[in-house]
Image (cartoon, helix red, strand yellow):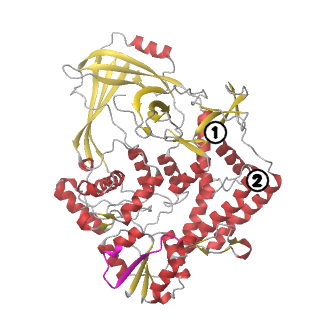
Amino acid sequence: MAKYLVIVESPTKEKTISRFLGPEYTVKSSYGHIRDLPKSKIGVDPENNFEPEYVIMPKAKKIIPELKKLTAGSKYVYLATDYDREGEAIAWHLKEALKLPASKVKRITFHEITAEAIKEAVENPRDIDPHLVDAQQARRVLDRLVGYKLSPLLWKKIKYGLSAGRVQSVAVRLICDREKEIDAFNPVEYWSVKAELKKSPDEPFLASLIAKDGKKIDKLDIRDSAAAEKTVAELSGAKYRVASVESKERQRAPFAPYTTSTLQQDASRRLHFSAAKTMMIAQKLYEGIELGDKGNAGLITYMRTDSLNISEQARKEAKKLIVSKYGADYYPEKPRIYKTKSKGAQEAHEAIRPASCRLVPQEIKQYLSPDEFKLYDLIWSRFMASQMVNAVYDTLSVDIAANNYTFRATGRTLKFSGFLEVYSVADSEDEQEDGEGRLPKMSVGDILDFIKLHSEQHFTEPPPRFNEASLIKALEEHGIGRPSTYAPTIHTIIDRGYVRLETRKFFPTDMGKLVNDVLQKNFSQIVDVEFTARVEGELDKVAEGESVWTDVVSRFYTPFNKDLADAEKNLARQKVEPQKSDEVCPKCGKPMVIRESRRGRFLACTGFPECRTTFSIDRNNQKIIKPAPEQTGLVCEKCGKPMLKRFGKRGAFLACSGFPKCRNTKKLPENE
């Protein structure tokens, strides 16, 4: 039997780490958590200082005896669970469940799964950090108290199966509040005026109207078509003369390497990945991918982090690759140091980066699935760019006089690519273009050829609905939740039917609005953004050893329990009432109403359950009539019956006419 036992959470991690340790070490997986609060009851005793009752999880009942057998013959047990509070708690639960003496336990942590990192961790073990364990325990107890006490109230007063939580309920509130802003928004009309000009023989360009009689024209100053027409009329026959030319050199700095939230935001914008999908793929990249002759290798550092720190070794490796691949001009005189701005960031962690930037994405593409490659390429590119020099642009701003009006044209050209060699900013919401592109060379006094005036009507826009990226950004900015909570929070609010994703935007459902209203009126602290952020701050103090976890829970629980008792007594039964419509059921003649599910709004017959007629509706609540199935002349290869062209939410497709006995479906041929 091996002299030392190393326990990790996952089989993939087990496989990867085994490569880096000698025959004296046995590496085994605990398959995640082995103890938790019981599902069948609350498992927390508020009357006894919030004492939690932990039970062995069903999946762990076969694993623990095997681990106990291995620990009995080992001199030391290295607990190598993840490098965050949850990982610290898993290590503590392992120690308790396996009844390990403190003298036998060594806690090791690492940001990346590489030979160097594992070796360094084994050589520098530490004790389990009780403060980190307490912080995770406090979060778990708080969430259990809210979930197991508030959810039954929602079942009783609204509908069975609902849930509430400290973070999820605030996320729903943010979405509901934004919807109220959109509903209350009154668009304001305004007009823009642009001149299409040319300096022969160059291409035409557009210049925007910015001033009249030397006074700035603001965005909303031209309020209607009459004002726009008057402006155009006053410019009739005007000569367009270059009044001033200003050229500058502008530099653009690269973005910092990824944290959990910025990775989820960018993967959503650029790759259209959900937060849950991003984290699932990142977990695989962190734990290890089979790279042919190189064996299993962890490709990225730990993916649950809010720190922007970069190790000195990684920085030196990046410098070496940048200088050799792109040239010395692409590396800054001083290494770039980034400071974390998010509230409560855990600075001991590192940013998300490649475990080794020498593993260039294109060179290992054959070993990765398409989605794994896309995410690894994003992480690799962002990190490399973060260590490179600024991009440099030549910008040009030209003011053009016409009668008593002034127009302005701006443009820019890339002078030196810098970090743009590896990371494009075109898809980033932070990208702000300086102008329309390249402008012709102009000098003061030049007379330009007039082509046309363009006047265009616009309306002010309401605030945009949240998408996954912007919701995660809002949660982080408010200090709500932590890196490990963003993805499960979004999954929960969709799964509970409080919101729905439509065209990648969050819409609150009628149920979500009702639950949010009930919580705001009866449990204002639960859905209060600032209060929830303060609780996160209190948990951080527990992790730092500055607060006692039971005191933090008590300060939250005392007012919450009073609100709960009041709601039990005073809150009347609530119900989501369906919206009336003008439609009549074509099958039974009864009125149809607008109902809602997590998939969207639809028309349903009031004769349900006897009549189950439903119709899809569009955003204007108009019934969507699907085209009738069409004959195709094709035959089902499974049963021999004709294949029909049918129409679904995602468009047309082929389906067997033998449905439901034969469920064969296919994509339409390209020529269809």
Number of marks in the rendered image: 2
Q: Is residue 391 left or right of residue 592?
A: left
The residue that appears at 63% across and 57% down in the rendered structure is 165
Magenta stretch: residue 25 in it?
Answer: yes
Inter-mark Cα distance, 1 to 2:
21 Å
Q: Quadrant of the N terminus?
A: bottom left
Residue 58 belongs to the span the image colors magenta: no
Q: For mark 2, does the 10 Å Cα neighbourhood hold few (<14), some (14 to 19), or many (20 or more) residues?
A: some
Q: In the depicted view, which residue is nearer to us: 572 or 180? A: 572
- Judging depth in this view, the residue of 44 and 478 nearest the camera is 44
* Kind of element beneath mark 1: strand
**Which amino acid, by three-letter code, is at mark 2?**
Lys
Residue at image location 57% in from the left, 53% down from the top: 492
Mark 1 or mark 2: name the one nearer the start of the chain: 2
What amino acid type is highlighted by mark number 1? Glu
Residue 149: quarter of image: bottom right
Q: Nearer the viewer, residue 259 or 91?
A: 91
Residue 458 pos. (x, y %): 48, 24
From the image, tell me which residue sits under label 2: 156
Residue 376: x percent and y percent? 33, 56
Residue at image x 36%, y 32%? Answer: 669
Q: Which residue is mark 1?
A: 596
Give the percent coordinates (x, y) of residue 333.
Answer: 23, 58
Viewer-proximal residue, 490 or 396?
490
Residue at the extreme right of the image, as rendered: 569
Label 2 residue SS: helix
The image shows residue 666, relative to residue 162, as above or below, that is above
